């Protein structure tokens, strides 16, 4: 099971120098994957959670590809309706080739209604637009003379049944975001049932979970990935047993001011990495 990190590409403390530092931390600690999120217009509804500056993922990941050598790079998640599907196909194929096939493309339908309006795209049809993106990517990339022979895994983000069905039909992996272990257990069973009903293979399971280490254990109502180091290690064991091929850790707890002082997040990643190195597991 591989383990990745969702790096904050937004907020008052984020800059090119800080993003470089994040890349060095993630790759230097031995994590397998560095991912980042996506917004285009920082409308008020976006700014409440993800304030400016915001670094666009394709541009930023292309730059980070030149600053790293091993770690995979990806989006968690690219908002499908915000760009023409053929532009995404081109940018992703180019980035995959330029990074020596290190790209993973996570896509999702999005949520910020004001941002949709600013971009002149329909919030109501975002599900259909996401499906259109996925089918267009598959079709475009089949033209290897034009787009090259790179293989780009498609992770479909989202927690709804619609997102699960989309992952089963069009994706390589289902990428749920920030849930409890009990929810994830039930959801993996749900994925199997829906895949059987659609007569399709079960997609890979690649959850993104919180990373918040606490001195003392937290109650069972906690989200996966938060609690004592013992609890978080146990969570990873459970996710491995549930069949996760990759787990993405999200050290951003929710306060944009965290981006001004990333050292706490880096220390949590270092603590976990040290325990994983001592673990008999393959992580």
Image (cartoon, grey):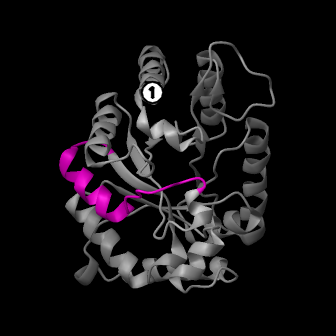
Quarter of the image holding residue 178?
A: top right
Is 107 magenta? The answer is no
Tell me residue 38's x, y (percent).
Answer: 47, 62
Residue 180 or residue 194, whichever sits in front: 180
Q: Judge whether residue 56 is colored magenta.
A: yes
Residue 204 against residue 17 in the figure, above or below: below
Q: Is 248 on the left or on the right of 203, as rendered?
A: left
Q: Quadrant of residue 220?
A: top right
In-front residue for pair 243/22: 22
Residue at 40% x, 56% y: name it.
53
**Residue 149 at x, y percent in the picture:** 27, 70
The residue that disc 1 covers is 269
| Image location (x, y in percent) of residue 245 | 53, 43
Residue at 65% across, 29% down: 226
Asked whether residue 146 appears in the rendered view, the answer is: yes
Relative to 149, residue 66 above or below = above
Q: Nearer the viewer, residue 105 or 144?
A: 105
Q: Which residue is at 60% across, 34% downward? A: 240
In the rendered view, tell whether residue 11 sits above or below residue 272. below
Question: Where in the figure is residue 13, as x and y percent of width and height?
Answer: 39, 43
Looking at the rendering, the stretch of residues picked out in magenta corresponds to 48-71
Q: Considering only vertical position in the picture, is 123 above or below 180?
A: below
Residue that appears at 32% across and 83% down: 143
The quarter of the picture where residue 120 lies is bottom right
């Amino acid at each position: 099971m591989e383990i990745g990190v969702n790096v904050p590409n937004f907020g008052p403390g984020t800059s090119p120098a800080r993003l470089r530092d994040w890349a060095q931390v993630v790759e230097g600690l031995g994590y397998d994957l560095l991912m980042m999120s996506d917004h285009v217009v920082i409308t008020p509804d976006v700014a409440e959670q993800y304030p400016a500056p915001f670094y666009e993922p394709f541009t930023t990941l292309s730059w980070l590809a030149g600053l790293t050598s091993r770690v995979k790079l990806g989006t968690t998640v690219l908002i499908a309706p915000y760009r023409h599907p053929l532009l995404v196909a081109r940018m992703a194929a180019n980035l995959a080739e330029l990074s020596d096939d290190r790209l993973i493309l996570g896509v999702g339908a999005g949520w910020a209604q004001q941002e949709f309006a600013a971009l002149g795209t329909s919030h109501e049809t975002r599900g259909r637009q996401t499906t259109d993106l996925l089918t267009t990517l598959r079709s475009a990339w089949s033209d290897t003379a034009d787009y090259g022979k790179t293989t780009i895994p498609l992770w479909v983000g989202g927690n709804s049944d619609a997102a699960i069905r989309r992952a089963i039909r069009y994706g390589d992996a289902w990428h749920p975001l920030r849930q409890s272990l009990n929810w994830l257990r039930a959801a993996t069973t749900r994925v199997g049932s829906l895949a059987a009903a659609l007569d399709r293979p079960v997609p890979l399971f690649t959850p993104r979970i919180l990373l918040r280490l606490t001195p003392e254990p937290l109650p069972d109502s906690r989200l996966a990935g938060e609690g004592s180091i013992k609890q978080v290690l146990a969570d990873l064991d459970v996710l491995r047993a549930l069949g996760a091929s990759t787990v993405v850790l999200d050290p951003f707890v929710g306060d944009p001011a965290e981006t001004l002082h990333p050292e706490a997040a880096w220390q949590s990643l270092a603590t976990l990495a040290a325990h994983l190195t001592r673990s008999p597991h393959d992580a």
